[in-house]
Amino acid sequence: MIDTHTHCTHSHDSKEQPRDMIEYAIARGLEYLAITDHFDGELTLLPEFDNIPQIDLARHFEELIALKEEYKDTIEIGVGIECGYMKEANSIYLQQLKGYATDIVINSVHTVEYEDCYLKSYFDKRSKRQAYGAYLEAVRESLDCPYVYDSVGHLGYVARKAVYPDKTFYYADHADLIDDILKTVIAKGKSLEINSNGLGETCPFLPTAEILIRYKELGGELLTFGSDAHLKARICDKYSIVAEFLKSHGFEYLFKYIDHKPVAVKL
C-alpha cells in the first residue's frame, strides 16, 4: 500500500508527530508514505485568516529529510507539501519553496473567489451550480500555475461541506469544464489524486466514480492515492475500496513520487 497525502504537526490542523505517522504506516505494511503538510500561502493574502499559523518550512524539510534517511531500510518516505492555490500567491510558492528538496507537491484548491469553500458562508450566497462551477474554474486555472507540482488534490473538494439537499458532484452538471480539467491534467503529465476523505458512504472518495471513469476514457493513467489523513489512524483509509474500484474499471497501477518522478505500483 502507498499513501501520497498525509499531514502531521507541521500542519496547523494536525496533532500527529511525523515519527508516529511513519511508525503507524510501517505497522500497517505500507511501502511508501508521503507527508505533505499544508503550505497555505494564499491565506497570508486574506486578512480574515491571520489566525491560521503558517508552516515552518525549514523545520518541515529538515525533520522529514532526516526521518527519510533514518527509515530508508524500512519504508520509503516521500517528502512533500500541499500548496493551496490562488493566483495571487504564485510568487509566494515560487520564492519560498526554492531550494527545498521535495518528492511530491500536491496542487489543491481550497479558496474560491477569495473565500474558503469549506465554510457555510461560501454556499449561502451561491447556488450549487455557481458554487461548484466557480470551484472548477479555480481548479482549471491552478493547472497553469508556474511552480512545480505533481498531483491535483481532491478534485470535488467543494462538495465536502456543501449545504445543498443533494451535494453530489455530478459530472453532467459541468461536463465541458471537467473534461477540460481532465484533458489538461493528462496533457501536462500530472497525476489525478484519489482522495479517500470523500463525502461519506455514498461517495467514499474524490473525485467521484463517474469522473474517474471519464478520466480513463480520455486516456488518463496517472493516479495517486491520498487518505488526506490528519490522524495516523486514517493512513490508507479506504485503500482496499479504491483499489477494487480501480481494478474493476481497468486501471492497473497507482503511482508514488520520488524526486517528482512517478513510480508505478501494481494494484
Image (cartoon, rainbow, N blue to C red):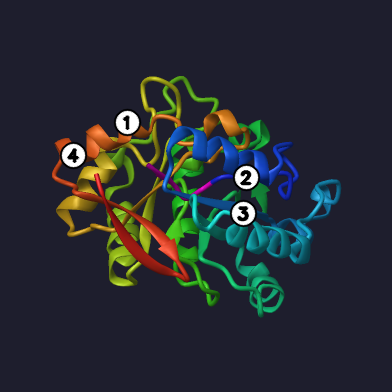
- Residue sitting farthest toward the front: 73
Residue bearing mark 2: 7
Q: Which mark is residue 116?
A: none
How far is the residue under mark 3 from the one under mark 4? 37 Å
Q: Is residue 10 above or below residue 238?
A: below
The image quadrant of residue 220 is bottom left
Label 3 environment density (alpha carbons within 10 Å; few <14, some 14–19, many ≥20): few
Chain-order first, disc 3 or disc 1: 3
- Position of the C terminus, as image quadrant, is top left
Please tell me whether mark 3 or mark 4 is closer to you in this view.
Answer: 4
Residue found at x 67% / y 76%? 91
Q: Which residues are magenta?
A: 1-5
The answer to whether the residue labelled 3 contacts the one labelled 2, judged by CB atoms less than 8 Å apart, is no
Q: Is residue 189 magenta?
A: no
How far is the residue under mark 3 from the one under mark 1? 36 Å
Main SS category, magenta section? loop
Residue found at x 72% / y 65%? 62
Q: Which mark is residue 240?
A: 1
The answer to whether the residue labelled 2 contacts the one labelled 1, judged by CB atoms less than 8 Å apart, is no
How far is the residue under mark 4 from the one under mark 1? 10 Å
Residue bearing mark 4: 247
The image quadrant of residue 263 is bottom left
Label 1 environment density (alpha carbons within 10 Å; few <14, some 14–19, many ≥20): few
SS state under label 4 = helix
The answer to whether the residue labelled 3 contacts the one labelled 1, judged by CB atoms less than 8 Å apart, is no
How far is the residue under mark 2 from the one under mark 1? 21 Å
Residue bearing mark 3: 113
